[in-house]
Image (cartoon, grey):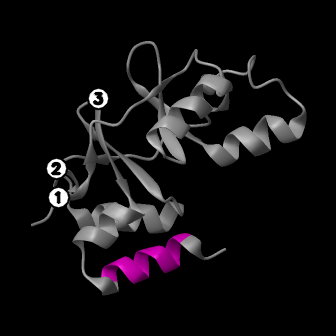
Amino acid sequence: MTVARDIMSPDPTCVNEDQNLVEAARIMRDLDVGSMPICGNDAKLMGMLTDRDIVVKCLAEGADPGAVTAGSLAEGKPVTIGADDDIREALQMMQHHQIRRLPVIDGHDLVGIIAQADIARTLPEVATGRTVEEISTP
């Protein structure tokens, strides 16, 4: 049985809830990523921050990205998967919630991220195609 831990990208870099969006954008640029987890001061996952969030929820609203914190954009309880959960469950969650990146936790610790690219690299084309189609359906 393939589990989330088997295909995830391990050791994700978090943006801290207190970091402003300019700092977050620079981290994304340096890591060449379009999203990253937001972690609280207690090191627990608070949500995910995307480059689109920065543009739509800050810049387009005329807010100052140097004054807006990553934590202020964390909304609701993040959708996650356990590290030892079956990969089929991870695919179902990504499809159901239409998310492209799924944080992987072990207990309360963030240990990885499953992205569409991880699925494409490791799973059969049929599973990859079905997941991408479901995530992208409006």
Cβ atoms at labels 2 and 1 below 8 Å apart: yes
Please give the count of numbered marks on the rendered protein.
3
Mark 2 and mark 1: span between their CA atoms? 5 Å
Residue at the disc numbered 3: 108
**Secondary structure beneath label 3:** loop
Which residue is found at the position 28% from the left and 29% from the top? Answer: 109
Which residue is found at the position 46% from the left and 68% from the top? Answer: 95
User: What amino acid type should be assigned to the residue bearing mark 1?
Assistant: Val
In the picture provided, is 131 more to the left or to the right than 17?
left
In the picture provided, is 22 more to the left or to the right than 121?
right
Which residues are the magenta region? 127-135
Q: In terms of secondary structure, what is the magenta stretch mainly?
A: helix
Relative height, residue 119 to residue 32 (above, below): below
Residue 36: image location, x then y, percent: 48, 39
User: What amino acid type should be assigned to the residue bearing mark 2?
Assistant: Asp
Give the image quarter of residue 89: bottom left
Residue at the disc numbered 1: 3
Residue 20: image location, x then y, percent: 65, 20
Residue at the disc numbered 2: 84
Which residue is found at the position 70% from the left and 38% from the top? Answer: 54
Marked residue nearer the N-terminal end (1 or 3):
1
In the picture provided, is 132 more to the left or to the right than 69?
left
Cβ atoms at labels 1 and 3 below 8 Å apart: no
User: What amino acid type should be assigned to the residue bearing mark 3?
Assistant: His
Marked residue nearer the N-terminal end (2 or 1):
1
**Secondary structure beneath label 2:** loop
Which residue is found at the position 67% from the left and 74% from the top? Answer: 138
Specify whether residue 77 is in view. no
Mark 1 and mark 3: span between their CA atoms? 18 Å
